[in-house]
Image (cartoon, rainbow, N blue to C red):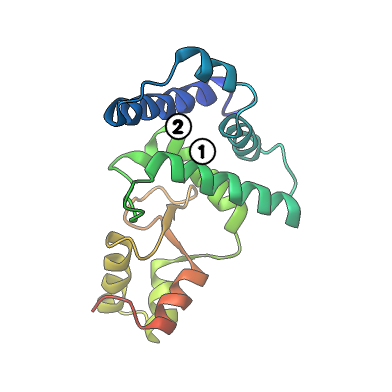
């Protein structure tokens, strides 16, 4: 049985539509209901959501092309959900990873980056040469400051130990010397 279905597609679409209407009102342009209804079935948002749900439900096999498509779909979805006019990094709200949308995002990220996700301890050792408390705290601050993305590891129940970060991001920040003290 599938974990996610079209109800989640409709829920996310409604959230994006509500934000679209709020922005339209703020700009003095009210979007028409008939235009937004026509876009539902063939919109890129709908296609992206169905692809992500298929991945989260285990319906896809990993190929380079599919991984690339899913990564683009996830990037677009997160841009719509978290994007802002200043193009600054947005931080996931508390409790996000326990929602259906958070679980969908987590599963898609794991599917895309399964070989590149590392623990905070591994990130500390990679970035600073050793896994000690002060270095783990620097990685945690980098996450809190939006310099590193993280996703929960679904196989670890303890929320203090289930954070995983992307190895390429840690390497990039290490090379740029941008990790917080």
Return the residue nearer the eye: 181 or 71. 71
Q: Mark 2 points at which residue?
A: 100
Asked if 77 appears above or below 160 in the picture, the reply is above
Image point 58% across, 17% down: which residue?
Answer: 38
Extreme bottom residue here?
129
Image quarter of the C terminus? bottom left
Q: Residue furthest top?
A: 34
* Numbered tag placed on residue 112 in the rendering: none
Q: Residues within 10 Å of mark 1 (few under 14, many from 20)?
A: many
Q: Is residue 155 left or right of residue 1?
A: left
Q: Is mark 2 on a helix, strand or loop?
A: helix
Q: In this view, does 124 lie to the left or right of 49?
A: left
Q: Pinpoint residue 22: horizontal percent, then vertical percent.
A: 31, 27
* x, y percent for residue 129: 40, 87
> Can you see residue 56?
yes
Estimate the spatial distance between the alpha carbons at disc 2 and disc 1, rounded to whole Å.
Answer: 6 Å
Task: Give coordinates of residue 74: x percent, y percent.
Answer: 54, 46
The residue that disc 1 covers is 104
Q: Position of residue 98 (x, y in %)?
A: 38, 37
* Residue 97 visible at all: no
Residue 42 drawn above or below residue 139: above
| In the image: residue 81, left or right of residue 26 | right
**125 and 113: which one is in front?**
113
Q: In which quarter of the image is residue 164?
A: bottom left
Question: In what quadrant of the picture does the N terminus appear?
Answer: top right
Instruction: Count residues near mark 2 (Cα–Cα under 10 Å), then give few for <14, some for 14-19, many for 20+.
Output: some
Residue in view at x 33 percent, y 51 percent = 90
Q: What element carries label 1?
A: helix
- Labels 2 and 1 touching (C-beta < 8 A): yes
Q: Between 3 and 144, which is closer to the camera in this rendering?
A: 144
| Residue at image location 32% in from the left, 76% down from the top | 179
């Amino acid at each position: 049985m599938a974990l996610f279905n079209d109800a989640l597609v409709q829920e996310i679409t409604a959230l994006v539509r509500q934000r679209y209407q709020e922005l339209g009102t703020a700009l003095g342009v009210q979007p028409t209901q008939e235009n937004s209804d026509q876009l539902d079935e063939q919109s890129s948002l709908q296609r992206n959501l169905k692809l992500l749900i298929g991945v989260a439900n285990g319906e896809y096999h990993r190929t380079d092309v599919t991984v690339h498509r899913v990564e683009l779909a996830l990037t677009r979805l997160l841009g719509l959900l978290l994007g802002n006019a200043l193009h600054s990094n947005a931080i996931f709200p508390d409790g996000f990873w326990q929602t259906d949308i958070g679980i969908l995002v987590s599963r898609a990220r794991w599917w895309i980056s399964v070989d590149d996700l590392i623990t905070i301890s591994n990130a500390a050792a990679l970035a600073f040469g050793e896994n000690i408390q002060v270095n783990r705290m620097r990685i945690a601050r980098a996450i809190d400051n939006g310099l590193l993305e993280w996703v929960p590891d679904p196989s670890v129940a303890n929320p203090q130990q289930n954070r995983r970060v992307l190895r390429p991001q840690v390497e990039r920040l290490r090379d740029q010397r941008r990790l917080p003290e």
